[in-house]
Amino acid sequence: ATLGGPFSPLRAAATYMPSTFEEQCEQRQINPDEWRKFLSTPILAEKCLLDMTDLELEAHYTRVEERAENTKEDRALIILERAQEGRLERQAGKLFLQSAKDDKICADQVPEMLEALRYELSNTEVHFLLRKFNATEDFDMVPESELSRRQWMWLVGECQMLKDSYRHINPEAFEIAYEAMINRQKTDRDPTPAGAADWPNLHKGRAGPALRPQSWGLPPEVELEMLRQVAATATNAAVAAGASPHSASALQRVAVAATATNGAAAARASPPTASAQDAVRGTPGDS
């Protein structure tokens, strides 16, 4: 039997390569389609967030954050799988083969490899990505940290998610909040850090403006910090305008929910769910 012409179904089936996400599902003996469907389904709250007590809110957000943490690799790989109809994933795979030694790459190779994939990243964005793989220490890169092919593909998916997130959040606001978080963590360990405000030259390639946004999700600590700042601003404004403390408290809770909603719109277009998006979409009374 022959495979037929270059566009025949038999030839296409013979040359099909599973995505990294599908490989992961096969290793776990999970059906990829069923797992995609599960990840696209938000965690539904039992009632409107504004009607919940503090304990109920805490329990709900704990569930959301736990699922976001436990499925972050899978969600990133789904984004990678779908980006540019799979071309990005294939390019990332070829680039890893060209750059790896003993099936590993080092952290100091990552900025140039991402640039080869036509990503333009600030030092803060590079730090954000490498930190997910324990390749940073305070404000510094740990250049000798090694990443496997699986981790590299995950990192590229995270990079795509980060860029996509700029459809819903301001890139400058994200970087300010993220840098403040890192600085606060460093200060907690070292009360008198020297030069903590200066970011290292992580990115040795060409500098330039970020690509148009393309991605998903913030780390919980950055998200909570941004929500806290917005909520505090709303409460102060309400009190200054003469609102009662009770009304100001209610407004604060509305501000938190409204801010989280900024990320929820993306959930209608893509399957992965991030913590704030899960929480808001799961609120029956918000629609």
Image (tube, helix red, strand yellow):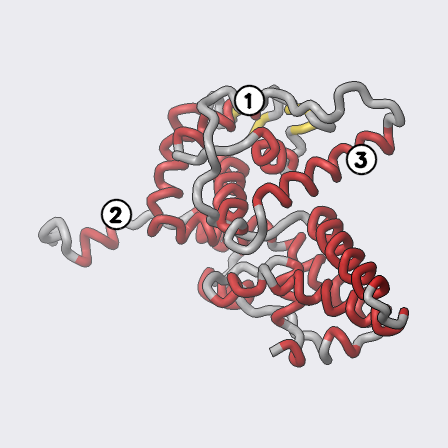
Location of residue 202 by image quarter = top right
Q: Nearer the viewer, mark 1 or mark 3?
A: 3
Look at mark 2 in the image and give the residue it sits on: 15
Please identify the quadrant where the N terminus is shown. bottom left
Place of residue 14 in the rendered image (x, y in percent of width and height, measured from the top left): 24, 50
Above or below 107: residue 235: below
**SS for tag 2?**
helix
| Residue at the disc numbered 1 | 108
Residue at x 25% of width, y 47% of height: 15
User: Who is closer to the viewer here, 56 or 107?
Assistant: 56
Up the image or down, 4 lies above or below 121; here it is: below
Q: Amino acid at mark 3?
A: Gln
87 sits to left or right of 8:
right
Instruction: Assess disc 1: are there few (<14), some (14-19) or many (≥20) residues with their C-alpha within 10 Å of its C-alpha.
Output: some
Q: Nearer the viewer, residue 93 or 282?
A: 282
Tell me the kind of residue under disc 1: Asp
